[in-house]
Image (cartoon, rainbow, N blue to C red):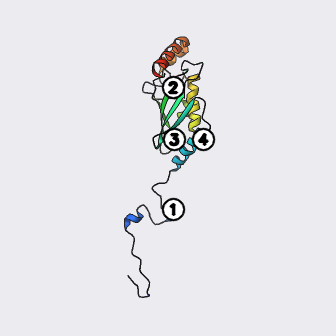
Amino acid sequence: MMTPGGSERLKPLPTAMYAGYSGTASSWVAKTSVSASGKRIQREMAELNVDPPPDCSAGPKGDNLYHWIATIIGPSGTPYEGGIFFLDIIFPSDYPFKPPKLVFKTRIYHCNVDAAGNLSVEILRDSWSPALTITKVLQAIRSIFLKPEPYSPVLPVIARLYLTDKEKHDEVAREWTLRFAK
């Protein structure tokens, strides 16, 4: 349509063309943008691929950046030696301000892992800090293979056996490793 001055008048765009736009440039968010937590997870994934901790690997399950699968090889000199332990890692949407949730998918006889695979370690509870990375978390989990935390167990029966009869504890842990992780 022509206006009296001879210029063409613009028609408003259909609402669908600018859905999500509230009138200011800073409020426009592209649907394909990666959140701050997603960018952090991507950066940690790149660092993990360049310099993984010993006997550990991890990465996204499929194309879901917030759900990873990790693998930890049981360290030599432990009852878990040679076992291959799989874990699910779920990153919360407000990561790194909240810790990831880790669950053992491979059964393990350990005082810090319950029957459902839920893990209880200090770094994922009271000691969590946004400065920590998934590499440091994997290192901490690997360290409980070497030195369990029997004074803050999720399974007190296993912790008690570890403290009172370490030889029997290690025998049972070795049997479980052979049965479930090899």
Residue at horizontal 47 percent and vertical 58 percent from the top: 30
Residue at horizontal 48 percent and vertical 61 percent from the top: 27
Residue for badge 3: 98
Whether tag 4 and tag 2 are in contact, CB under 8 A, the answer is no
Whether tag 3 and tag 4 are in contact, CB under 8 A, the answer is no
Disc with the residue nearer the chain's start (1 vs 3): 1
Mark-to-mark CA distance, 1 and 3: 26 Å
Outermost residue on the right side: it is: 51
Mark-to-mark CA distance, 3 and 4: 20 Å
In front: label 3 or label 2: 2
Mark 3 neighbour class, 10 Å CA radius: few under 14, some 14 to 19, many 20 or more: some
Element class at badge 3: loop
Residue at horizontal 48 percent and vertical 31 percent from the top: 87
Q: Position of residue 5 (x, y in %)?
A: 44, 88
Disc with the residue nearer the chain's start (1 vs 4): 1
Residue for badge 4: 47
Disc with the residue nearer the chain's start (3 vs 2): 2
Outermost residue on the bottom side: it is: 4
Q: Position of residue 54 (x, y in %)?
A: 60, 30
Classify 69 as above or below 83. below
Q: Which mark is residue 44?
A: none
Is residue 103 visible from the viewing direction of this image?
A: yes
Mark 1 neighbour class, 10 Å CA radius: few under 14, some 14 to 19, many 20 or more: few
Mark-to-mark CA distance, 1 and 2: 48 Å
Q: Position of residue 81 (x, y in %)?
A: 55, 20
Residue for badge 2: 84
Element class at badge 4: helix
Q: Position of residue 32 (x, y in %)?
A: 47, 54
Mark-to-mark CA distance, 4 and 2: 22 Å
Name which residue type carries label 1. Ser
Is residue 147 visible from the viewing direction of this image?
A: no
Residue for badge 1: 26
